[in-house]
Amino acid sequence: MDGHVYGAMGQPGVGFLMAIVIGALAGWLAERFTAANMGLIANIVMGILGGLLGNYLAHKLHIPVFGFWRNLISATVGAVIIITIYRAIAGRRY
């Protein structure tokens, strides 16, 4: 361990409850950007998964992600990517 305390999503200052809030907002934004029709739980799940994907991609691209707004942006981008991939796989059924 490096001696630092990390919260949810591996970011300092983002606790579990805030990760759910960021996930819900990011999922809702991604739902609006992709014109998907999902419910609240699906928005939260897509936002949290999008946060994980967005933070992973930002880390690989050497983009620092910390704080509310940067986590929200990375989670939204990740959620949009996940929804787009899901739609491509599901095809017309979605």
Image: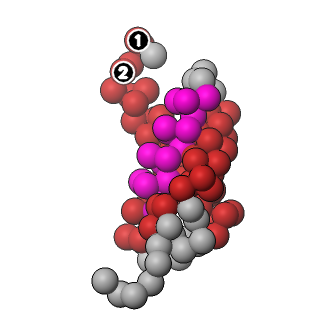
Q: Residues within 10 Å of mark 1 (few under 14, many from 20)?
A: few
Q: Residues within 10 Å of mark 2 (few under 14, many from 20)?
A: few
Q: Quadrant of the C terminus?
A: top left
Residue 84 sits inside the magenta stretch:
no
Under circle 2, the secondary element is helix
Q: Which residue is mark 1?
A: 93
Q: For the view shown, which residue lies furthest in the bottom direction?
A: 3
- Report whether 85 appears left or right of 23: left
Q: Is the residue 29 above or below the residue 34 in the image?
A: below
Asked if disc 2 and disc 1 are in contact, CB closer than 8 Å, the reply is yes
Residue 48 sits inside the magenta stretch:
yes
Q: Nearer the viewer, residue 44 or 29?
A: 44
Q: Is residue 34 visible?
A: no
Q: Is the residue 39 above or below the residue 33 in the image?
A: above
Q: Is the residue 16 above or below the residue 63 in the image?
A: above
Residue at (41, 62) in percent of width and height? 57
Residue at (47, 73) in percent of width and height? 6
What sort of colour scheme is used for the picture? secondary structure
SS majority, magenta: helix
Residue type beneath disc 2: Ala
Q: Which label number is shown at residue 3?
A: none
Q: Which label number is shown at residue 90?
A: 2
Residue at (33, 26) in percent of width and height? 89
Q: Which residues are magenta?
A: 40-55
Q: Quadrant of the N terminus?
A: bottom left
Please tell me in which quadrant of the rendered image residue 25 appears. top right
Q: Nearer the viewer, residue 93 or 56?
A: 56
Residue type beneath disc 1: Arg
